Amino acid sequence: MIEAEGLSKQFEDFLAVDSINLQVNAGEVLALLGPNGAGKTTTVRMLTSVLRPTRGWARVAGYDVVKEAARVRAAVGVLTEQHGLYERMPAPAYLDFFGKIYHMEAAARRDRIRSLLEGFGLDPDDQRPTGEYSKGMRQKLALARALIHDPPVLLLDEPTSAMDPESARLVRDAIHGLRSANRAIIICTHNLPEAEELADQIAIIRRGRIIIQGSSTELKQRFLGPAEFEVRFNTSQNGSLPDLPDQIQLTSQGEGWFRYQTEQPQEMNPVLLQRLLAHDFAVVSLQEVNRSLEQVYLQAINTPEPSKDLNDVG
Amino acid sequence: MWADLKPAFVVAWREIRDMFRDWRIIIPIVGLTVFFPFLMNFTARQVVGYVQQYGANLLATRFIPFLLMIVGFFPITVSLVIALESFAGESERHSIEPLLSSPLTDLQLYLGKLLASLVPPVLASMLGIGVYLVGVNRSVGWNAPPLFLLQIILLTSVQALVMVSGAVVVSTQTTSVRAANLLSSFIIIPMALLIQGEAVVMLWGSDEILWWIILGEIVISGMLMRAGIAHFNREELLGRELDVLNLHRSWGVFKNAFIGEARSFKEWISVEVWKTLKKTAIPLAFSLLLLPVGLWVGFYLSEKLNISPALLNLKQIMDMNAGIASGLRESGFISPGAVLYIWLHNLRVVLLATLAGVFSFGVFGIFILLAPLALMGFLAQMATTAGIDRWNFLAAFSLPHGFLEFPAIIITCALIMRVGATMVTPAQDQSISDSWLRALADWLKIVLVLVVPLFLVAAIVEVYVTPYTISFFLGR
């Protein structure tokens, strides 16, 4: 659905995007992460045939972004970084305008507008100008605009920004639904937990280059090492820990707890548990330590210079 | 065709509806459409009453049509504000990006916005004209001749088109309404001068010239639209993030274009200058064609204006003799000072013409350079009425320094055309400022290597040789 190879964009003497490779299939979500000015928006603009790549190529929904620009734009729904609503227009009229632009028939437009507005918790009969809407309502309306023509590909820049938790949940559920409906989706976001929740693949972009790409689990493995587990036991238990198997590495410990890493948790965790019980340790819990994508992101971003071997770990 | 235009109408209709939700646009339009014509009616009545007291009815008959033009013009001034708001405003508010991400073509979007900026003010203008005409018919019994009314309607419409198409060009070079408003002085000032010129023409009662003005404005709006369509595209609109003036970078672009790939002065002269001349081949051909046009305009105007040769004292030329050179020497004309004066004067004209050309797509620059040719043609044609052969006259005053001066004029004309043309034809993957800087570097290259030396040698010849050729051709 979305493919790009060596995609680059040069603005005069500034290389905004440098040789990006992407592959997002139908029913997949890719999260594009990176600091401001990293090249995320420029990448999205090239994928929507708004900007012409300086080098490389990309195909979106089967169409070449340069040679078949109009078809690409018709097949893509875009949520721009700034919602860009017409603030004197009511929401239904606003969506109706975009429906016309996408050549939708009047009856189809009417039904689609009602279902989208209701789906996002907006009143389809509200005739207030959108300028009177809250930030979250505007964002939802902008998302409805991106979906008006039911596109097979979605490029969403900060889809839940400025939304209250309930609205953000609504939008995330909508994105889950779209993925299930076989849409190919790229999300640009600074919201890392959201990226982790929604995305099948994560790409971190810095100074125009993708420095790492892969699933959340793969990236954590790569940057934070093997999975880490924590064992808690009854604090009244005295005595040191029994000898641990070679495949288990102790990372930290305190009174009534210790943490370890292992590359074979399925084999090693039962062995460890048996050994602890054999030594009369009253084990209260054994669970995986939650490691955030934020740790991966910060490590990746703070790596001094991007090197090619970091790319495409997945 | 309809399918291609329909999205443009959808865009236009949305903008027009949106516009009529804004009181800041409604109030001036209503005021200028309804109340202003009443004020002009009152003014017309007062003027007619006043001038009739002194029997100056001619003034009244000229003043009423003049006010008609003013009534038509005022509502269309709003079109500039609407256009700046529509183009630059949408970029500033980021509402243009969803449109650019849609299947609309650049041309559909451009046309839609152009229509939205044009239609309401032009309709308001027509309504104002109607209100004024009814008023003057009732109050002083004046009816506009149909052809004149057509002229005013066309004039008003093309003026709106010039302002809107100019506003688009201005808007594509900015990312904010504030900057666009500042740049719009490039539209307001020429328009103000144009209206003053039109006022003079109307009070003079020369309706024929109005047709030429309409034609000229159609040509200018065509060029502005060409420039607007060239620059109003996704790449230009979203490729620019800030209006920061980066002098260091601009200097780099200019320097690279000026030096080119040359590694030595010799290579620069033999390769780069030659390459630039080749790039200027088409404008050079055009300006070569303009040379006889300039002379013809002079011949034509001389015949049309039919001024008595006595007024120009051409008889004196007939009385010239071989002593002219000694006379000029005695008067101090044949001197290095005169050479310097003529040379600097010609260079000043080149600079002035280039400056004028930059702000008029090259047009006014070419006019300034054609003016001396037209003047020579005019005088040569006048000379025929005094019994002098016009070709003899031309040969006497333009040879032999003309062999050097005319090529310099032709080259300068071509360079100005190229600098002007970069505004309407942007190069692929180059911003308008970069294309323009490169054209300017090419201009400087050729001016330094060819135009300046040619004018210098021409000035020397003009001072030291031409007086003898005048004696030769015209002396008795």
Image (cartoon, coloured by chain):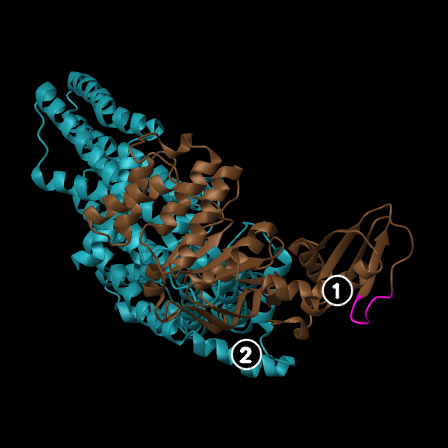
Chain colours: A brown, B cyan
Instruction: Say how many tags the image has.
Output: 2
Q: Secondary structure at mark 1?
A: loop
Quadrant of the rendered image containing residue B283: bottom left
Q: Residue at x 85, y 59 (%)?
A: A279
> Where is mark 2, residue-wise?
B272
Question: Where is residue A18 drawn, in percent x and y?
Answer: 58, 69
Question: Where is residue B387 drawn, in percent x and y?
Answer: 23, 64
Q: Is residue A93 above or below residue B380?
A: above
- In the picture, the quarter occupied by the N terminus of chain B is bottom left
Chain for disc number 2? B
Q: Are marks 1 and 2 on the same chain?
A: no
Closer to the camera, B388 or B53?
B53
> Where is mark 1, residue-wise?
A304
Sort mark 1 into few (<14), some (14-19) or many (20+) by Cα contacts within 10 Å: few
Task: Check disc 1 and give the amino acid type.
Answer: Pro
Quadrant of the rendered image containing residue B365: bottom left
Magenta range is A243-248
Left or right of A2 in this view: B40: left
Question: Where is residue A58 drawn, in percent x and y?
Answer: 45, 71
Quadrant of the rendered image containing residue B256: bottom right
Q: Residue furthest right?
A: A239
Q: Secondary structure at mark 2?
A: helix
Asked whether residue B68 appears in the rendered view, the answer is: yes
- In the picture, the quarter occupied by the C terminus of chain B is bottom left
Give the Cα separation between the discs numbered 1 and 2.
Answer: 43 Å
Closer to the camera, B288 or B69?
B69
Closer to the camera, A44 or B203?
A44
